[in-house]
Image: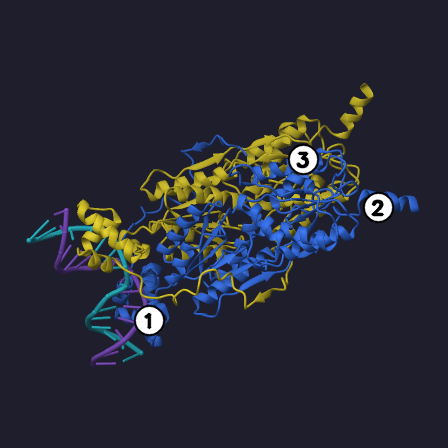
Chain colours: A yellow, B blue, C purple, D cyan
Amino acid sequence: MAKQPDARSQPTQPAGATEPAAQPPARTRRPTIQDVARQAGVSVAATGRALGGYGYVSEEVRSRVNAAAAELGYRPNALARSMITGRSHTIGFVASDIENPFFARMLRGISDTARAQQVGVILTNSDEDVERERAAVQTLLEKRVDGIIVAPADIAATEHFQSAMDEGTPIVLVDRPVRGLAADLVMTDNLKAAEAAVEYLINLGHERIAIIASQRPESQQEIERRLADWTSAPVDGLVRPGVARVLGYYRALIAANQPVRPRLVRTTTIPSRVRSGPYRAEWAATQTLAVLDGPERATAIFAADNDMTLGVMTAIRNSELRAPEDISILAFDDLDWATVVQPPLSVVAQPVYELGTIAAQRLLARIGGDESEPRAVLLNTRLIERASTAPPPSRLRRARRAR
Amino acid sequence: MAKQPDARSQPTQPAGATEPAAQPPARTRRPTIQDVARQAGVSVAATGRALGGYGYVSEEVRSRVNAAAAELGYRPNALARSMITGRSHTIGFVASDIENPFFARMLRGISDTARAQQVGVILTNSDEDVERERAAVQTLLEKRVDGIIVAPADIAATEHFQSAMDEGTPIVLVDRPVRGLAADLVMTDNLKAAEAAVEYLINLGHERIAIIASQRPESQQEIERRLADWTSAPVDGLVRPGVARVLGYYRALIAANQPVRPRLVRTTTIPSRVRSGPYRAEWAATQTLAVLDGPERATAIFAADNDMTLGVMTAIRNSELRAPEDISILAFDDLDWATVVQPPLSVVAQPVYELGTIAAQRLLARIGGDESEPRAVLLNTRLIERASTAPPPSRLRRARRAR
DNA sequence: TTGAAAGCGCTAACAT
DNA sequence: ATGTTAGCGCTTTCAA
C-alpha cells in the first residue's frame, strides 16, 4: 500500500460551483420543539405528542404541527429523547479488525438487522487487545448504547462485560466465547467443522495431512491439556475457534486411527504480538514450506483461517508443487477470491453473515426485554468441494498403473 | 455462502459456569453525578468539575470525588454532556457497502483517526441508493453526530448534504464528488491513474487494449459528452471514479495515436440495478469473454475495479489463454489476494487507508472550527508491476524469432 | 384531548 | 476554589 500518497490539493477549484454563491449558511440555532409549538400555536406537550407519535392528538393539531415543523426545518434531537426514554436506539460492535473480510461481512449482517429496526451501529476495533476492548466498552456505555456485540479479545477477561450487564446493558458474544460469562453467544461449531474437514481429506486417501494454524501462547497449553483427557470437559463453545479447529484435526486423525505427526502440526505460537494479517500470512508461508519437505512431507494441508490460507497459497505458488496433484489444500472460510485462484479452493464455509444477523437478533431481543437464560448458538458449516482437493499422489499413481 | 446455517442451540449449557451464581444483577438506577456529590460531601458543580476535568478543583476535593465515583461505579452520561456542549464526539460514515474491501479499509483509516481523538464512528450502508443515503444522513443528524463522511451514491443529489451543512454539521465526501456542493472532497486521481495504467500497457507494446468497467446509465452519456470536447471543462474531481477511469483510458490511447476499438471498450451499463459484487463480477466475466475472441482480440485487459477484476480473472481461468503470455491483465486496487493468484497481479494501487485518514482529518478539522474554503484533495496512485503484465504475444514471437 | 410543569444528567454562568 | 441555579430539548406525569 502506498504509504505516502503524495496528496495534491487544489485550493482554487472546490467540489463545484454550479449554484450562485448561496447566502452565508444562516447558522441560526436549530429549531426546537418549542419553536414548532409557538409557530403552530399549541403547547409543547401537544407538539411533542404529534411529532413523537405518542399520546393523544387531534388531527387538527397534528397537521398544524407537521406544517410548522416542515416550515421550520425541524429535526428531532435523539439525544434529548434518549435521556428521557433511556433508549438510544444504537448498539455497539467491538470487532477485532474490521478490515478482515470475516468481520466486514459479519458487520454487514449486524447492520442490516439493526437498520431494519431503526437501530444504529457504532463500530470499534479492538485489534485483539483487551485494553482497547475495555476502553471501547467503556466509551460505548458512556454513549449509552442499548447493547453491545463483541468478538472478545480474551477468553478470560470478563469484568468489563459483567459490569455492563450488571448495569443493564446486554452483551452478545460472537465468534468466540468468554469463560464464566452468562451472556448470549453466537459462533461457528469449529470443532465439528474441522473434524469434518479433516475426515474429508482422510476419505480422499490422505495419510499425511498438515494443519497450519497460529495460536496464542495460552492456547497451546490448552490444546495439550485437552488432548491429554478428551472426556474431562465438553469442548463445544468453550474454547477459541483456533483451539477448536486444532482439536477437531486431532479428533479426526484419532478416529481414523492415523498417527499424529508432530512435524505436520504447525500450531505453535506466532512470534511476539504479531497478530495482524500480513505477518500472520508470512508466518503461515514459512510453516507451509516446512511441511512440504522431507520424507514425511504432507500430501494435504488444512489452512485454519483467512491469513493462513493466504500464506499457504503464496508458499505453494512459489514452490514446484502443483495443487491438487501434488498437494491438496482445504481452507477455512469462503472468501470472494476462492474461485479465482488456480485451482479454485475447496473450503469450509462459515455462515458469516448469519453470525452477524443472529447475534444482532439476540441482542435486539434482549434489549426488547427478553430475560430468558443466555443461550449458546453454534452454527454449522458447509464443506464446498472445488478443485484444490484430490486424492494424494500415491493413490493417483496407483490408479494410473491399474488402468 | 450457507443460507440456512442450520443453527443448533444448547439451552442447557450456557457460555460457562465457572463462578458460583452471582447475586441477581442489582439492576439499580445508575449512579449520577448527584449521587457522587452526596457521597463525597461536595456540591454537584464541584463534582462535575472534578469528574469532567474542567474549571477549578482542589486536590482535596478531586480525590474525595474520585473515591466516591469509584465506590459507586459512576459512569458519565455522554448523552447529557452532549446536550449541553453540543458535541457528541461521534461522527457518521455512510459507505455504499462495508463488505467491499475498499470501504472496509477506508473505514479502518477513518476509525483509527477518529479513535485517536476519542471520537466514535457510526456506520451505515447506502447500497448505492440515494433514498437510503438520505435516511442515513437524517438519522445521523438526529443522533447529533459532529460531522459526516460519505461516499455519495449520486453525483447530483445535494440537498440532504446541503441542509446538513446549513445546520452546521460538516460533510466530507470521499471517493466520489457531488456536483455543486461546497464540501471537502478526498478522492483518488482516477483519470491520471487510468491514463498512466494504459500508457504503461502501450509502452509494453500492446495495441489492442480492452477496458472492462461497469457504468451507470447516466455515466455513459457523460463519457460521450466529454469525449466530444475534451477542453470544455476540467475533469478532475468532477466525475465519478468509473467515468474518470474510462476517460483516462481514452486519453492514453489518443495520446499514443492508437485507434479506439469500440469492441474492446466494455463500459456499457450493467443490467437493471444489478450493483452488488457477485453480479457485477459475473457481468465482467461475460464482457471479458467477448474481448478475447475474434480477429481484433485484446492482448491486454484493464479491469477498472474490484468486481471487474474478479470477473476478468474467472473468465481467463476458464479460457485456454494464459496470462501474461497470451493476455496481460492490469487491475485497479491492490487487494490482499493479488499476490496469491497465478500470475500475481500487476495493479494500480489506491491509497485507500489514507483516503480514510485524510477524510477523517479534514472532518475533525472542520469540527474543530476550521472555516477555510472547502478543498478537493486528489490522491495519487502507484502502479505495482507484478507478473500479470508483459509484452503482447506478437512482440514475444518477434523477439524469439530475432534470437 | 390538551396544557403546565417537573425532570433526564449534566455543564455553564454567576455569585460567594 | 466552591456552591447555587438555570437550563440543553425532549417526554411524562398530572390536572384541566
Closest to the observer, A298 or B7: B7
Element at badge 3? Answer: loop
Closest to the observer, A157 or B269: B269
- Mark 2 and 1 residues: CB-CB less than 8 Å, in contact? no
Amino acid, disc 3: Pro
Q: Quadrant of the N terminus of chain A?
A: bottom right
Q: Nearer the viewer, mark 2 or mark 1?
A: 2
Question: What residue did someone put label 2 on?
Answer: B395
Amino acid, disc 1: Arg
How far from the left and from the top, in percent, is residue B403? 93, 47
Q: Are callouts 2 and 3 both on one chain?
A: no
Question: What residue did someone put label 3 on?
Answer: A344
Amino acid, disc 2: Arg
Specify the subunit that label 3 lies on: A
Specify the subunit that label 2 lies on: B
Element at badge 2? Answer: helix
How far from the left and from the top, in percent, is residue A362? 39, 40
Specify the subunit that label 1 lies on: B
Closest to the observer, A166 or B233: B233
B182 over A69 or under it: above or below: below
Task: Give the side of residue A158 with respect to residue B316, left or right.
Answer: left
| Distance of label 2 from label 1 (alpha carbons) | 76 Å
D13 over B16 or under it: above or below: below
Q: Quadrant of residue B313?
A: top right
